[in-house]
Amino acid sequence: SLYSALAARQNNVGMTSLGVFFLVGSVICLALWVVILGAPLAEGRLMAIATLGGFVSMLGYVLWDYGMRTGNTQMIGITSFLIPILSSFVLVISGQGRFTPLLLLALGLVMIGISIAKYGDSILNSNK
């Protein structure tokens, strides 16, 4: 939210700044996790899953930021819907989640949302 507020007010805030915000945010979260909560660091496979999940979230935020800068509201909507799908796939592929009928239904609903975000205007305008 700090990055979004800064980028909205300053035109010269670029993608490098976004990377710095992600790095600082990661360090702060790791420090809170280990120092304040006293929780152990994840090992091996769990650390790989967390890292991959972080990259999925970062990719989504970068695409969202691009959509905001270019005024592409479809990109913003699709990115918002796409992150839960990619996160679910990461969990299923890594063995931490199961592919169930309920997950399939949820993914289908998200895909319908993406379709509405992408093609909703053209469908509404063609019916007039």
Image (tube, rainbow, N blue to C red):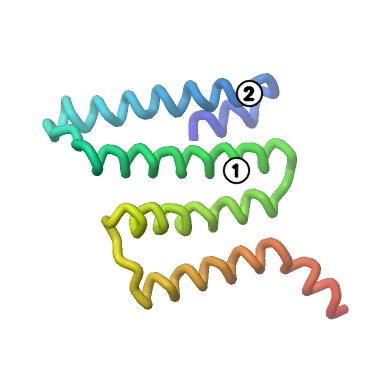
Q: Earlier in the sequence, mark 1 or mark 2?
A: 2
Q: Is residue 62 above or below residue 27?
A: below
Q: Which image quadrant is residue 113 in?
A: bottom right
Q: Position of residue 93 (x, y in %)?
A: 36, 56
Q: Which amino acid type is marked by label 2?
A: Gly
- The image quadrant that residue 103 belongs to is bottom left
* Residue marked by disc 1: 64
Q: Residue at (74%, 43%) from the top-left corner?
A: 71
The residue that appears at 54% across and 27% down in the rendered structure is 18
In depth, the one of 43 and 63 nearer the eye is: 43
Q: Is residue 41 above or below residue 52?
A: above
Question: Would residue 101 be found to the left or right of residue 1 on screen?
Answer: left
Does 75 sit left or right of 84 as displayed? right
Secondary structure, mark 1, is: helix
In this rendering, position of residue 92 left or right of residue 69: left
- Residue 50 x, y percent position in the rendering: 32, 41
Q: Which residue is farthest bottom?
A: 127
Residue 17: give x, y in percent of width and height.
Answer: 55, 21
Give neighbour class at mark 2: few <14, some 14-19, many 20+ (Cα, 10 Å).
few
Left or right of 8, for residue 3: left
Q: What kind of residue is marked 1?
A: Trp
* Residue at (72, 47) in percent of width and height: 72
Residue 14: numbered disc: 2
